[in-house]
Amino acid sequence: MQDILRYINSVEGVIGSAVFDDHGAVVDHAFPPIIDADSIKKAAGLVLECAHGLQITQSLDILDMRYAEGRIIIKTFPGAMLCLLCAKNVNLQVLTITLNLAVKKLEALLPGTAAPAAAAPADEAADSSTLRLGISHLANKDASKSFDSLGMIAVSQPTSAYISEFYKTPFKKLTLTNTAAGTSGTFPVMVMKDIDTQFDGTIIVGPGIEKKLQVIEGNKVEVKIG
């Protein structure tokens, strides 16, 4: 779990993170030493009260509390909550994608929230040098085929920002590798604005590139700057 919390902390502007269970206990944390254990326990209790009082688990996915010099961000998921202490200028779009990926790993590590077999991919978050994202495709087949005609792949605007932040550089091409099949390819990237949020954190490909990489929707591929 420490590896996943450090993965979250790697986002610029995140100062520290913690997992609290639904009873207000601290499951694990990765805060700077200046923040002592008693303070984190008190924070867990306050977060629980806040979550219950505002019915966050029923109505909200993320609660963003902003202060003069910082922000506290709470993300709920089955059986637990993530609490993040952040700088006031943290990029919430990039952070949201990171949290969506990390929560899937955390769910697998919490008792009773996932089947044991689901825990295997948890090491993906621990690899801080290579990014792995899922494959998706558009429901509109003609639009997907147009990617193939240009030899392109696509990403949402938040995903583009996330990849740039991960590798600390802008990009125009990405190299995708399906390690299971040993296939790889480098493709120019189209950044799609105003696309449904279901595509955030994924690489959108057409049927031709799916065939070339031997992947189907939902498969994970290694993503590197081309």
Image (cartoon, helix red, strand yellow):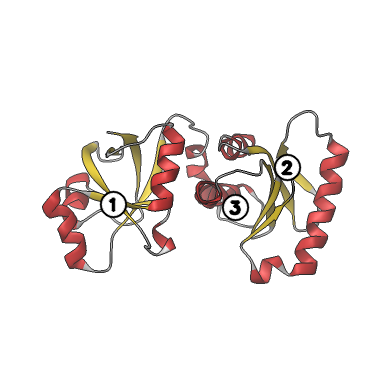
70 up-or-down from 62: above or below: above
User: Which residue is under mark 1?
Assistant: 154
**Helix or strand or loop: what does disc 3 sit on?**
helix
Where residue 178 appears, x then y in whole percent?
29, 41
Real-space Cα separation, disc 3 to disc 1, in angstroms: 28 Å
Q: Tell me which residue sits at (32%, 37%) in the image.
A: 171
Residue 69 is tagged as 2
**Helix or strand or loop: what does disc 1 sit on?**
strand
Density class for disc 1 (Cα within 10 Å; few <14, some 14-19, many ≥20) is many
216 up-or-down from 52: above or below: above
Q: Amino acid at mark 3?
A: Glu
Q: Quadrant of residue 226?
A: top left
Real-space Cα separation, disc 1 to disc 2, in angstroms: 36 Å
Where residue 210 appears, x then y in whole percent?
22, 52
Select label 3 or label 2 by which is in front: 2
Q: Tell me which residue sits at (25%, 53%) in the image.
A: 205
Which comes before the other along the chain, label 1 or label 2? Answer: 2
Q: Quadrant of residue 39?
A: top right
Asked whether residue 35 appears in the rendered view, the answer is: yes
Marker count (numbered): 3
Density class for disc 2 (Cα within 10 Å; few <14, some 14-19, many ≥20) is few
Density class for disc 3 (Cα within 10 Å; few <14, some 14-19, many ≥20) is many
Q: Amino acid at mark 1?
A: Ala
Callout 3 touching callout 2 (CB < 8 Å): no
Residue reaching furthest to the front? 68
**Helix or strand or loop: what does disc 2 sit on?**
loop
- In-image side of 175 versus 114 (left or right): left
Q: Amino acid at mark 2?
A: Glu
Where residue 84 appears, x then y in whole percent?
68, 45
- In-image side of 163 versus 11 (left or right): left
User: Which residue is under mark 3?
Assistant: 107
Question: In the depicted view, which residue is nearer to us: 28 or 200?
Answer: 200
